């Protein structure tokens, strides 16, 4: 099955990482593969230098470097895939994983919660429910003689 020509790796929000910024490394994989596991370089490492990428705006670069700081080494993001026996399937898995990581990191932050106070009616309803519950429990007690 020939691989289709790809101009780059689309990660969403109009951003596509060009193939020229992606570096591939291959090595022998552990796990399934039978006799071929010792000869086939099916483990895939996909490397992308996020700190020096030309496709990111300064805001996007800052967001990626901050959110992926635990995964970056000198601004370089490495994704590995070795769960499949075939190198081609591991390549696809690594591409998908990198796209998901970058898309999640670029997602804008959720707005912070605006603190609110309960309304007067809500307070009265809550206290009324507590009073009713207290009365129910009081009726369950044995009589005081």
Image: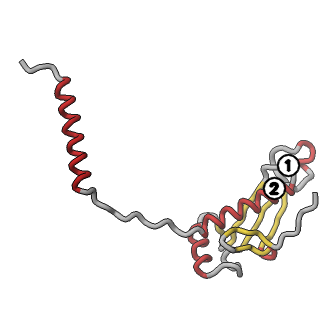
| Mark 2 neighbour density, 10 Å: few (under 14) some (14–19) many (20 or more) | many
Q: Position of residue 97 (x, y in %)?
A: 71, 59
Up-down relation of residue 134 to residue 44 (above or below): above
Q: Which mark is on residue 43? A: none
Q: CA distance from mark 2 to mark 1?
A: 8 Å
Q: Position of residue 80 (x, y in %)?
A: 75, 59
Q: Residue 135: name its quadrant.
A: top left
Q: Which residue appears at 73% of the width and 73% of the height?
A: 16
Which residue in the structure is indicated by mark 2? 90
Q: Of residues 120 and 73, which is closer to you in this image? A: 120
Q: Of residues 119 and 78, which is closer to you in this image? A: 119
Question: In the rendered structure, are the residues bearing label 2 and label 1 in contact, judged by CB atoms less than 8 Å apart?
Answer: no
Tell me if 95 is positioned left or right of 35 in this view: left
Sequence-earlier tag: 2 or 1: 1
Q: Which residue appears at 90% of the width and 49% of the height?
A: 38
Which residue in the structure is indicated by mark 1? 85
Q: Position of residue 128 (x, y in %)?
A: 20, 42
Q: Given the current orientation, which residue lies at the most extreme top position?
A: 145
Quadrant (top left/top right/bottom left/bottom right) for the C terminus: top left
Q: Given the current orientation, which residue lies at the most extreme front position?
A: 121
């Amino acid at each position: 099955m020939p691989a289709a020509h790809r101009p780059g790796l689309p990660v969403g929000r109009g951003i596509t990482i060009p193939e020229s910024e992606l570096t591939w490394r291959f090595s022998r994989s552990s796990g399934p593969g039978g006799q071929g596991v010792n000869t086939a370089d099916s483990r895939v490492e996909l490397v992308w230098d996020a700190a020096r990428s030309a496709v990111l705006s300064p805001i996007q670069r800052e967001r990626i470097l901050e959110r992926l700081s635990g995964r970056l080494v000198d601004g370089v993001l490495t994704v590995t895939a070795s769960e499949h026996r075939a190198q081609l399937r591991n390549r696809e898995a690594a591409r998908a994983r990198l796209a998901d990581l970058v898309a999640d990191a670029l997602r804008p932050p959720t707005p912070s919660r605006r603190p609110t106070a309960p309304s007067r009616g809500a307070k009265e309803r809550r206290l009324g429910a507590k009073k009713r519950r207290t009365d129910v429990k009081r009726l369950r007690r044995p009589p005081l003689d």
